[in-house]
Amino acid sequence: MGLVKNFFGRFSKDLGIDLGTANTLVYVKDKGIVINEPSVVAINERTGQILAVGQEAKTMIGRTPAHIIASRPLHDGVVSDFEVAEKMLKHFIEKVHRETFALLPRPRVVIGIPLGVTEVERKAVEDAVLNAGARQVFLIEEPMAAAIGARLPVQDATGSMVVDIGGGTTEIAVLALGGVVTWKSLRLAGDELNRNIMNYTRDKFNLLLGERTAEDVKISIGAAYEDVEMLETKMRGRDVITGLPREVTITSDHVREALAKSIRLFCDTIKDTVEETPPELVADVYERGILLTGGGALIRGLDVRIQKEMQIPVRVAEDPLTCVVRGTGRVLENFDALKDIFVLSTQPQS
C-alpha cells in the first residue's frame, strides 16, 4: 500500500485547502496560492451535470431557471451538501493538476476546519477530500492555520489571540504551545452581515436587495466605527410597495447602523473568550494584541472598534483573506516540524 501511495505521490502536488463557506482557496506546495474562487457549484437538476464551479457559478446565483441550481455546499463552515462539496473539491484538485502530466492525481492534502465541529462533520470533510482524489488528509483548526499563515509563534509558550471572521463562522481562539487553549465559535460572520444589510434596507428604504448586492455594499462602504471616512454608494433593488425596480443612495453610516447588533456580539464574544483565558496568557495577549483574519477583518474601523471595547491592541493581518490557506501551505512546507498541531483523524491511518 505504501509503495502505491509513494508512486502516486511522486506525480501529485501536495495541497493546502481553505474550504470556506464563501470562498475556497488552494495552495500548492512550492508554488503558492493557485485557486481563490467562491464555494459555489451550478448544477443541472435534470441531468445531475455540473455546469460551473467557482466564480462562474457565483454569477448565476439568483439568476437561474428552475432546473439549474447554484448551490453552496458549505453552511456555517461545515459541509451541508456532501455530494456537491465532493464534486467541487474534485474540480479544484483536477484543475491544479491539469498543467502537470498526472493522469490520476493523488495529492496529500492539509485542510482547515472550524473549531468545535462534531466528529460527524469532521468525517464529512475527510471523506469529501478523499473521494475527490486525495491519498491522505490532515485536518487543522482554522484559527491555528490563520495564526501560522500570519507567522505568529504558535508553538511557543506565549499566548496569541486570533479572531478569524469568515463567511459562515467567526472563530475566536487563544493559542499557545501548538494548541488551542480557549475558544469560542460564532455562527455569525460575513453571510450574516449581508443579511443584516438586506433586512435594514427593507425596513428603512422599503427596498428588497439581492444577496450579491448586499455583499457589494458591505465590501465597498461597510464600516464598524463612527470615525471612519464617510462613503456612499448607489444600490438597486425591488421596491416592496410598488414591486418596481428602484435605486437608493446608501452611506457608510447606514451600513454601520445595519451591522451594529452583529458587531456588538463580536465584541462581547471576544470579551467572554478573554475572561475564560488563564491570566498568564491574558498578559501575553494584552502585550501582543489581537490579530484579525478572514474577509470580515476588512470591514473598515472594525479593528479600532474592538480595540476601544477591549483596551487591547488590535491589528488586521496582512492579506487577511488568505491567512488560513497560507497557514496550510506553511504546514506543508514544514511538515515534520508542525505535524503535532493536526486534529485527530477519524480515518484509520495506513
Image (tube, helix red, strand yellow):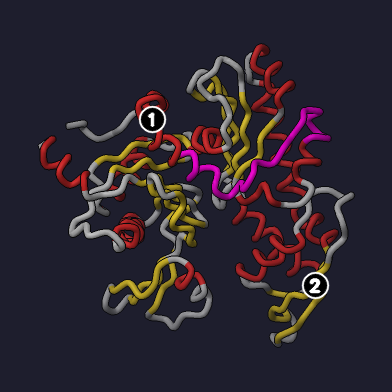
**Does the magenta-highlighted stretch encompass residue 331?**
no
Answer above or below: position of 212 versus 301: below
| Residue 343's disc number | 1
Distance from Cα at disc 2 to Cα at disc 1: 47 Å
Left or right of 114 on screen, residue 304: right
The answer, for residue 188, to whether it is visible in the render is no
The amino acid beneath tag 1 is Val
Residue at point 86%, 52% (across, down): 228
- Label 2, secondary structure: give it: helix
Q: Position of residue 88 (x, y in %)?
A: 35, 60
Q: Is residue 310 magenta?
A: yes
Rendered position, 50 above or below 134? below
Q: Quadrant of residue 275?
A: top right
Please report the bounds of the magenta region as a residue range: 307-327
Q: Residue at x 45, y 64 (%)?
A: 40
Three-letter code for the amino acid on which mark 2 is drawn: Phe
* Quadrant holding the N terminus: top left
N-terminal label among 2 and 1: 2
In this image, 164 relative to 87: left or right?
right
Residue 176, visible in the rendered structure = yes
Q: Give x and y (percent) for residue 5.
A: 16, 41
Is residue 193 found left or right of 311 in the rendered image? left
Residue identified by numbered label 2: 205
